[in-house]
Image: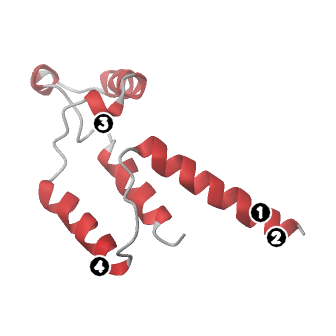
Amino acid sequence: MCSIYPQRYYWRKRASVYWNYDDEEEEEETTEETAEAKEKETSNKKRDELPSRFPIAVQNLVAETLSAIRPKLKLFKSLEEAEEAADRVDKEMLRSIQV
């Protein structure tokens, strides 16, 4: 349970618009309006289809750290998986508090 939240944080950062963009968009100047439009467009696309520029060193560090702490842990493969798992844990905790 304790490794779900760091994975969700990792996937939120990795899914950020900053790390996911096309080469053509890189050349355009960014204003507040275009940044908001890009963020909406990115949220509409599947995150797995976007080219990721997230540092491979960070990806490896997260995977190695979590596997060292919890060897039997299944790493999530997307933000959606991490969000669903965190939501399940949140609901379980709320149920146990309300009893």
Residue beneath label 2, please? Answer: 97
The disc at residue 17 is: 3
* Secondary structure type for disc 1: helix
Image coords of residue 38 (percent x, y): 32, 24
- Give the alpha-carbon distance from disc 1 to disc 4, as whole Å: 30 Å
- Mark 1 surroundings: few (<14), some (14-19) or many (≥20) residues within 10 A: few
Residue 44: quadrant of the picture: top left
Q: Is residue 64 above or below residue 29?
A: below
Q: Quadrant of the C terminus?
A: bottom right
Going by the numbered disc 4, the residue's amino acid type is Ala
Q: Is residue 23 above or below residue 8?
A: above
The disc at residue 94 is: 1
- Mark 2 surroundings: few (<14), some (14-19) or many (≥20) residues within 10 A: few
* Residue at the extreme bottom of the image, as rendered: 69
Residue beneath label 4, please? Answer: 68
Disc 1 to disc 2: CB gap under 8 Å: yes
Q: Is residue 80 above or below residue 27?
A: below
Residue for point 24% across, 35% down: 20
- Give the alpha-carbon distance from disc 3 to disc 1, as whole Å: 32 Å
- Give the alpha-carbon distance from disc 2 to disc 3, as whole Å: 36 Å
In the rendered view, does 5 fall on the left or right side of 11? right
